[in-house]
Image (spheres, rainbow, N blue to C red):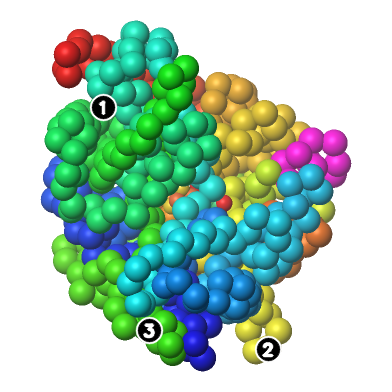
Amino acid sequence: MQHFLQSVYDLIVETSTNLPADVRRAIRNAQSLEDKGTRAALSLSTIAQNIEMAETNVSPICQDTGMPTFIIHCPVGADQITMKRQIREAVAQATTDSKLRTNSVDSLTGANTGDNLGPGTPVIHFEQWERDDIEVKLILKGGGCENKNIQYSLPAEIPGLGKAGRDLDGIRKCVMHSVYQAQGQGCSAGVIGVGIGGDRTTGYELAKHQLFRSLDDVNPNEDLRKLEDYVMENANKLGIGTMGFGGQVTLLGCKVGVMNRLPASFFVSVAYNCWAYRRQGVVLNAQTGEIEDWVYERGSDQPMNEATQPVAAAEASQPEAVAAAPDADESDERREIVLQTPISEEQIRQLKVGDVVIINGMMHTGRDALHKYLMDHDSPVDLNGAAIYHCGPVMSKDQAGNWKVRAAGPTTSIREEPYQGDIIKKFGIRAVIGKGGMGPKTLAALKEHGGVYLNAIGGAAQYYARCFKKVEGVDFMEFGIPEAMWHLQTEGFAAIVTMDSHGNSLHADVEKNSLQKLEQFKEPVFA
Ligand SMILES: O=C(O)C[C@H](O)C(=O)O
Ligand code: SF4
């Protein structure tokens, strides 16, 4: 087993940096279904480009490398204690090498362990089997999509769909609602694993296990096959689209499993995974630990790079493609505006929902810990006219000892909703950048103070990392790398105005429209 540690390390790197072929095919299929030039199509092009960049750079596809979860099948007599120790070593090494973000945080103090090791992390499950080889599967499921998991207890009253009973049709309603409630916040288009039955714990586990299925397999259970096909056909009619921008494709996959339950319980558990659907596996020789095969077709066999046209060129010098691209729901041309920080109120008031903005100058990262802190403390830097980026990057030092941004896509902004409006007004912030949109309190503050919310493409961590030319400094390293406040010299950071200073919110519109569409699925289908 002298190669086991190296094999697990290789598995981690492959999973974090190279999206498997079945997922790539699903994203390419989504690209072909979206109308050219729409926000959704342009976002998918950015995603496709990011997938290629991650593979080339051997760097994380998304900065949130998730909860490393290993499922190991091994023959009777295999040494599980050694395997577990070496898996932990491989995780720590991959973290040092910036293939994983420092993602293990003390739940009470917020202290980051710095190596992805801690109580409960990583997750490692062993099971014995009768084969001679060892199989190690890994899923890296990020926190934003994990937050959109949902569990229903039937019978229930489902918003938009009415009564859901303890039958296949009740399950259908839960699943349709689970896609609706995720909106763009879990970086749609997503994949859902559904677990029917079990208790609350095993139901979720079953749901997550479904995410290990191949996207193109066919469910052997006829009822579940019908349900999967139904959901794949109809969830896309909700019109939520990529990143919740509206569009034809909201779901890339739906996999349903079933297990027995207690007479009193009937759970439908849904594990929602973003498009950055990172799971891979290896089959190992049980004597040497060497990799004999990969469980899922590898990404390198399925290139993404045909006919891609990203949201905007990362270099502000070549943005023509986007400027000329009309949106399907707008007759006028998409405007593209270059902003240099600090930004004035006048510049902000000219922006409207749908505009593409290119930001140059200083950008400051800030997420949960910083927003809470700023409520009753001063900022270490002047934030007048500033752009604040909801982002927890992967950072490491180069040989000269300078910090470098290794992966830096946006995080889900709605978590800052309790604080954002107050902070915008207190410090004079003009641009808030994140993903998934924010609520009415922030929208009101943007209107009152003159601010704008910009939606970056979730998961596009390599695409955005290259816009950060220099790390000027960092505050609050005690919050840990993802939560610290990084001050970044930025060039050509492209994002879309989805909430403007005139009270308009694309997110509110899409949510309202998709609820109306959800209501069309009220009538029984599986009677
Ligand atoms: O933690 C992050 O960087 C992002 C998170 O996965 C999210 O989707 O909000
Ligand atoms: S930022 Fe988006 S793509 Fe990345 S882990 Fe979170 S939900 Fe997934």
Assign the magenta stretch its main secondary structure.
helix
User: 470 or 34, which is in the foreground?
Assistant: 34
How dense is the environment of label 1, judged by Cα within 10 Å: few (below 14), some, or many (20 and up)?
Answer: many
Taking the magenta stretch, the answer to whether it contains residue 128 is no
For the residue with label 3, is its CB less than 8 Å from the closest atom of ligand 2?
Answer: no
How far apart, in angstroms, are the residues tagged by discs 2 and 3? Answer: 41 Å
Could you tell me which secondary element the residue under label 3 belongs to?
A: loop
- Residue at numbered disc 3: 285
Q: Give the quarter of the figure containing the C terminus.
A: top left
Could you tell me which secondary element the residue under label 2 belongs to?
A: loop
- Quadrant position of residue 318: bottom left
Vertical arrangement, residue 119 with respect to residue 225, above or below? below
Residue at position x 78%, y 62% in the image = 477
Could you tell me which secondary element the residue under label 1 belongs to?
A: helix
Taking the magenta stretch, the answer to whether it contains residue 377 is yes
- Residue at numbered disc 2: 400
CB within 8 Å, label 1 to label 2: no
- Residue at numbered disc 1: 238
Please report whichever mark, 2 or 3, sits nearer to the chain's N-terminal start. 3
How far apart, in angstroms, are the residues tagged by discs 1 and 2? Answer: 51 Å
CB within 8 Å, label 2 to label 3: no
Q: Tell which tag, 2 or 3, sits nearer the viewer.
A: 3
Q: Outermost residue, right direction? A: 377
**Magenta region: which residues?**
369-378
How dense is the environment of label 2, judged by Cα within 10 Å: few (below 14), some, or many (20 and up)?
Answer: few
Vertical arrangement, residue 218 with respect to residue 135, above or below? above
Where residue 402 appears, as percent x and y from the top left, is: 68, 80
Where residue 226 appears, as percent x and y from the top left, is: 15, 32
Residue at position x 50%, y 52% in the image = 142
